[in-house]
Image (spheres, rainbow, N blue to C red):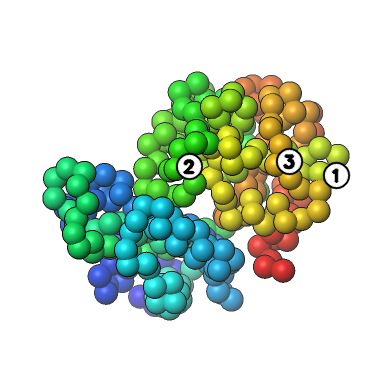
Amino acid sequence: MSGAPAESLAWFEGRWDQPQRLAVPLDDRGLNLADGVFETLLWRPDGPVLWPQHCRRLRRGCALLGLTPEPDTDRIQDLAAEGFRRLNSASGQAALRITVSRGPGQRGLALPQPQQPRLWLQFHTVTPCFAPVDVITSRLVRRHGDSASSRCKTLNYTDAVIARREAWMAAADDALLLGSTGRYACATAANLWIQRGMDWLTPGLDQGCLPGIMRGQLLQRPGSHEEAVSRQALLAGGGILLNSVSCRPIRSLDGQATRHQLSSQDAGQLFARLCRDD
């Protein structure tokens, strides 16, 4: 698939093609029960960004769900490198989604024996985004820190879809989700950070936020730590929504402008630093 740049490309069962031309069988538990995990990461001409960290989280998610055998991440990397060459991305960058489902299964929840996990890969041309966002506080969805599913990227993103739709209906870009304690946990697909002076603060995992890869990168830096985030702290500080393909300053919360807003340039520079595995 060389020649003109493509926007997307996928792999399933030995075949590369456009995502809409490939099909996962209807007996797949990932489709029927959201029984699986996934990872999304940035791929550049020099290779995947923070690959070891993403592989570790993928393996942890598979272990949590009991998906066996464990995915061969070396094989996945080789496949993905081939896919990126085939994609011929116009932007020179792409988001890679790695999906592992439990595979075929009968009706109901009983686990198939033996398991036959299925793997598929999807590339989408992407340019990391640093544009500011207007967010609302979701009234419909909450995160739960004591839930096992909060600790890995399962295929069940129904709550995120509900909250994102809630934001769109309010003419906002995204929704912030509260944890079970009533403090902020995260956004629909990004970790929440606020700046207080020279420090960076993010909700703890006990609030139900996902242990994001970029979150882990920022936590390793001096002055970054976990702390409960209130509405007042968010409005007073320079908040950002951070994930593997974006770092977006928060411009307003529930229609109220934040007092300090990180510039898009500063957000881009922070993102670039966090992408370096040093």
* Alpha-carbon span between mark 2 and mark 3: 20 Å
Amino acid on which the number 1 mark rests in the picture = Met
* Alpha-carbon span between mark 2 and mark 1: 29 Å
* Residue 198's disc number: 1
Q: Is residue 10 left or right of residue 111?
A: right
Q: Is residue 74 left or right of residue 221?
A: left
Characterize the local packing of mark 3: few (<14), some (14-19) or many (20 or more) Cα atoms within 10 angstroms: many
- SS category of the residue bearing label 3: strand
* Alpha-carbon span between mark 3 and mark 1: 10 Å
User: N-terminal of the two: label 2 or label 3?
Assistant: 2
Instruction: Examine the rendered structure and indicate whether residue 170 appears above or below residue 145.
Output: above
Quadrant of the rendered image containing residue 249:
top right
Whether residue 92 is visible: no
* Camera-nearest residue between 179 and 43: 179
- SS category of the residue bearing label 1: loop
- The quarter of the rendered structure image containing the C terminus is bottom right
Instruction: Examine the rendered structure and indicate whether residue 272 appears above or below residue 250.
Output: below
* Residue 150's disc number: 2
Q: Position of residue 53 (x, y in %)?
A: 56, 63
Instruction: Examine the rendered structure and indicate whether residue 189 appears above or below residue 48.
Output: above
User: N-terminal of the two: label 2 or label 1?
Assistant: 2
Q: Is residue 9 left or right of residue 88?
A: left
Residue at the farthest left position: 106
Q: Position of residue 151 (x, y in %)?
A: 49, 46
Quadrant of the rendered image containing residue 231:
top right
Residue in view at x 43 percent, y 72 percent: 73
Q: Which residue is mark 3?
A: 201
Amino acid on which the number 3 mark rests in the picture = Leu
Residue in view at x 57 percent, y 51 percent: 212
- SS category of the residue bearing label 2: helix
